[in-house]
Image (cartoon, rainbow, N blue to C red):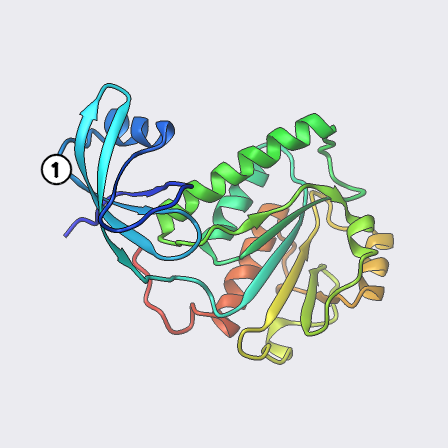
């Protein structure tokens, strides 16, 4: 059985109502996926739960759907994971955002580190933020999540570290010479919070590592090999979810 296509619709949804799909969603549904009147689809607005719906009318760019029922379906990790990712060059940041959503993070904090190749003006940062949020929505459509992870405005790593941490947060940073392995650390309590700090190309500068340690971060190593920035964070997220989250119990469809 083929599942109905999923679409993120950032608007109020309620069973028993009819509504027009947003222009972007309507275009993708009709022009790309070739859906027609009577076809089923699944809608979610990012606030939790999803809605079964069907197309009842198509007129050029307008697609009218009937919302049939609400499903209290959630696919969130029992861990609250924040990925603090130093800006990566090219398409690496896009890949990291996309896969981090699939791996269950609920917050992404882009930071500018000393070794970040990318430098963003305020205007460009706003455009990139909007772009990343679009990637988050598309990734949720693909992987089945009904709650959109937050992506915050990029800022300097040192400025972010200076704020300190709330109580009860497990803070981890990746470093080839890290003092700890995941297997040596105690699992967070149920509903625990984890912050994972990952450097850009070239990793974190020694001064940043020292500052992060003062802010409560434990230096974490991932085996004997040095991983690229686009590999390291995703590998760590997968290992965290396997050891402490929901990958150790759930079957995945690949």
Q: Quadrant of residue 234?
A: bottom right
User: Between 15 and 205, which is closer to the camera in this rendering?
Assistant: 15
Q: Residue at x 60, y 77 (%)?
A: 188
Determine whether the residue tagged by mark 1 lies in a helix, strand or loop.
loop
Residue situated furthest front in the rendering:
17
Q: Quadrant of residue 24?
A: top left
Residue 50 percent coordinates (x, y): 32, 53
User: Between 166 and 198, which is closer to the camera in this rendering?
Assistant: 166
Residue 170 percent coordinates (x, y): 67, 70
Q: Residue at x 28, y 21 (%)?
A: 61
Q: Is residue 41 above or below residue 107?
A: above
Residue 169 percent coordinates (x, y): 68, 70
Q: Bin the neighbour count of mark 1 within 10 Å (Cα to Cα): few under 14, some 14-19, many 20 and up.
A: few
Q: Is residue 36 above or below residue 245?
A: above
Residue 40 percent coordinates (x, y): 18, 43
User: Between 150 and 70, which is closer to the camera in this rendering?
Assistant: 70
The quarter of the image holding the C terminus is bottom left
Q: Is residue 10 above or below residue 189?
A: above
Report the side of 3 relative to 144 (left or right).
left
User: Between 96 and 37, which is closer to the camera in this rendering?
Assistant: 37
Report the side of 20 relative to 84 (left or right).
left
Q: Residue at x 32, y 67 (%)?
A: 251
Q: Which residue is mark 1?
A: 38
Q: Residue at x 73, y 45 (%)?
A: 202
């Amino acid at each position: 059985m083929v599942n109905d296509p999923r679409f993120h619709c950032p608007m109020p949804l309620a069973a028993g109502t009819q509504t027009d799909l947003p222009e972007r969603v309507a275009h993708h549904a009709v022009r790309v996926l070739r859906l027609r009147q009577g076809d089923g689809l699944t809608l979610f607005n990012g606030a939790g739960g999803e809605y079964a719906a069907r197309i009842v009318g198509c007129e050029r760019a307008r697609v009218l759907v009937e919302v049939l029922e609400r499903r209290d379906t959630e696919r969130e990790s029992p861990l609250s994971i924040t990925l603090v990712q130093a800006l990566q060059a090219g398409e690496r940041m896009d890949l990291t955002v996309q896969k981090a959503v699939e791996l269950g993070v609920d917050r992404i904090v882009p930071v500018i580190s000393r070794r970040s190749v990318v430098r963003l003006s305020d205007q460009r940062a706003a455009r990139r933020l909007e772009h990343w949020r679009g990637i988050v929505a598309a990734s949720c459509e693909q992987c089945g999540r009904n709650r959109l992870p937050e992506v915050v405005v990029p800022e300097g790593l040192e400025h972010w570290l200076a704020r300190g941490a709330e109580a009860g947060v497990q803070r981890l940073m990746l470093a080839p010479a890290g003092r700890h392995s995941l297997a040596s650390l105690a699992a967070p309590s149920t509903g625990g919070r984890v912050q994972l700090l990952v450097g850009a190309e070239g990793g974190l500068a020694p001064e940043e590592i020292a500052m992060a340690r003062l802010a409560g971060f434990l230096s974490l190593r991932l085996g004997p090999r040095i991983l690229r920035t686009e590999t390291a964070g995703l590998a760590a997220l997968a290992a965290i979810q396997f050891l402490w989250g929901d990958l150790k119990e759930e079957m995945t469809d690949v």
